Protein backbone atom coordinates (compact mmCIF):
# COMPACT_ATOMS: atom_id res chain seq x y z
CA UNK A 1 0.00 0.00 0.00
CA UNK A 2 1.14 3.54 -0.67
CA UNK A 3 2.87 5.12 2.33
CA UNK A 4 0.82 7.86 3.97
CA UNK A 5 3.45 10.51 3.21
CA UNK A 6 3.16 9.83 -0.55
CA UNK A 7 -0.63 9.82 -0.64
CA UNK A 8 -2.04 12.84 -2.45
CA UNK A 9 -4.65 15.03 -0.90
CA UNK A 10 -8.02 14.92 -2.60
CA UNK A 11 -7.63 18.41 -4.12
CA UNK A 12 -4.27 17.35 -5.65
CA UNK A 13 -5.58 14.15 -7.27
CA UNK A 14 -6.14 14.09 -11.03
CA UNK A 15 -9.45 12.39 -11.77
CA UNK A 16 -9.21 12.97 -15.51
CA UNK A 17 -10.56 15.29 -18.15
CA UNK A 18 -13.98 13.66 -18.40
CA UNK A 19 -14.56 14.01 -14.68
CA UNK A 20 -13.43 17.63 -14.61
CA UNK A 21 -15.62 18.46 -17.62
CA UNK A 22 -18.66 16.91 -15.93
CA UNK A 23 -17.90 18.86 -12.74
CA UNK A 24 -17.68 22.15 -14.66
CA UNK A 25 -20.99 21.43 -16.42
CA UNK A 26 -22.65 20.67 -13.08
CA UNK A 27 -21.30 23.87 -11.55
CA UNK A 28 -22.40 25.94 -14.56
CA UNK A 29 -25.88 24.48 -14.26
CA UNK A 30 -26.11 24.77 -10.48
CA UNK A 31 -23.31 26.59 -8.65
CA UNK A 32 -24.74 25.86 -5.22
CA UNK A 33 -23.33 24.47 -1.99
CA UNK A 34 -25.18 21.22 -2.75
CA UNK A 35 -23.38 20.85 -6.10
CA UNK A 36 -20.00 21.45 -4.46
CA UNK A 37 -20.84 18.91 -1.76
CA UNK A 38 -21.91 16.35 -4.37
CA UNK A 39 -18.64 16.78 -6.28
CA UNK A 40 -16.66 16.45 -3.05
CA UNK A 41 -18.51 13.24 -2.14
CA UNK A 42 -17.88 11.72 -5.57
CA UNK A 43 -14.18 12.64 -5.37
CA UNK A 44 -13.92 11.00 -1.93
CA UNK A 45 -15.58 7.82 -3.21
CA UNK A 46 -13.29 7.79 -6.27
CA UNK A 47 -10.22 8.27 -4.07
CA UNK A 48 -11.35 5.46 -1.79
CA UNK A 49 -11.86 3.16 -4.78
CA UNK A 50 -8.40 4.02 -6.15
CA UNK A 51 -6.79 3.32 -2.77
CA UNK A 52 -8.54 -0.06 -2.60
CA UNK A 53 -7.47 -0.89 -6.17
CA UNK A 54 -3.86 -0.04 -5.29
CA UNK A 55 -4.06 -2.17 -2.15
CA UNK A 56 -5.46 -5.15 -4.10
CA UNK A 57 -2.85 -4.74 -6.85
CA UNK A 58 -0.03 -4.63 -4.31
CA UNK A 59 -1.30 -7.79 -2.61
CA UNK A 60 -1.71 -9.75 -5.84
CA UNK A 61 1.51 -8.92 -7.65
CA UNK A 62 4.98 -9.85 -6.41
CA UNK A 63 7.56 -7.15 -6.06
CA UNK A 64 9.89 -6.62 -9.01
CA UNK A 65 12.93 -7.50 -6.88
CA UNK A 66 11.64 -11.01 -6.20
CA UNK A 67 10.83 -11.50 -9.87
CA UNK A 68 14.29 -10.50 -11.06
CA UNK A 69 15.98 -12.64 -8.41
CA UNK A 70 14.00 -15.65 -9.66
CA UNK A 71 14.86 -14.85 -13.27
CA UNK A 72 18.57 -14.77 -12.47
CA UNK A 73 18.33 -18.49 -11.66
CA UNK A 74 17.32 -19.13 -15.29
CA UNK A 75 20.66 -17.90 -16.64
CA UNK A 76 21.99 -20.66 -18.99
CA UNK A 77 25.43 -20.53 -17.36
CA UNK A 78 23.86 -21.34 -13.98
CA UNK A 79 21.32 -23.88 -15.26
CA UNK A 80 23.86 -25.87 -17.29
CA UNK A 81 26.44 -25.96 -14.49
CA UNK A 82 26.29 -29.46 -12.97
CA UNK A 83 27.91 -28.38 -9.71
CA UNK A 84 26.13 -25.20 -8.72
CA UNK A 85 22.69 -25.73 -10.28
CA UNK A 86 19.99 -24.12 -8.10
CA UNK A 87 17.16 -26.17 -6.65
CA UNK A 88 13.73 -25.39 -8.09
Image (spheres, grey):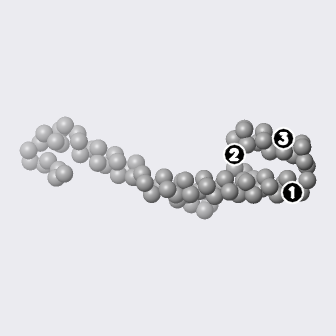
Closer mark to the observer between disc 2 and disc 1: 1
Q: Circle 1: is it few (<14), some (14-19), or many (20+) Cα within 10 Å? A: few
Question: Label 1 near label 2: C-beta < 8 Å?
Answer: no
Residue 44 position (above or below residue 79): below
Q: Which residue is mark 2?
A: 15
Does dot 1 land on a helix, a strand or a loop? Answer: helix
Name the residue: 23% across, 45% down.
73
Name the residue: 83% across, 42% down.
24
Q: CA distance from mark 1 to mark 3?
A: 14 Å
Q: Which mark is residue 42?
A: none
Quarter residue 5 falls in: bottom right
Q: Which mark is residue 25?
A: 3
Q: Which residue is mark 1?
A: 34
Name the residue: 39% across, 52% down.
62
Q: Residue furthest bottom?
A: 4
Is 39 or 67 nearer to us in this picture?
39
Does dot 2 land on a helix, a strand or a loop? Answer: loop
Q: CA distance from mark 3 to mark 2?
A: 15 Å
Amino acid sequence: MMPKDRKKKIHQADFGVSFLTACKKLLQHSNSAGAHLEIKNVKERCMSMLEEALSQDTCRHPSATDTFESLSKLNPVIILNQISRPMF
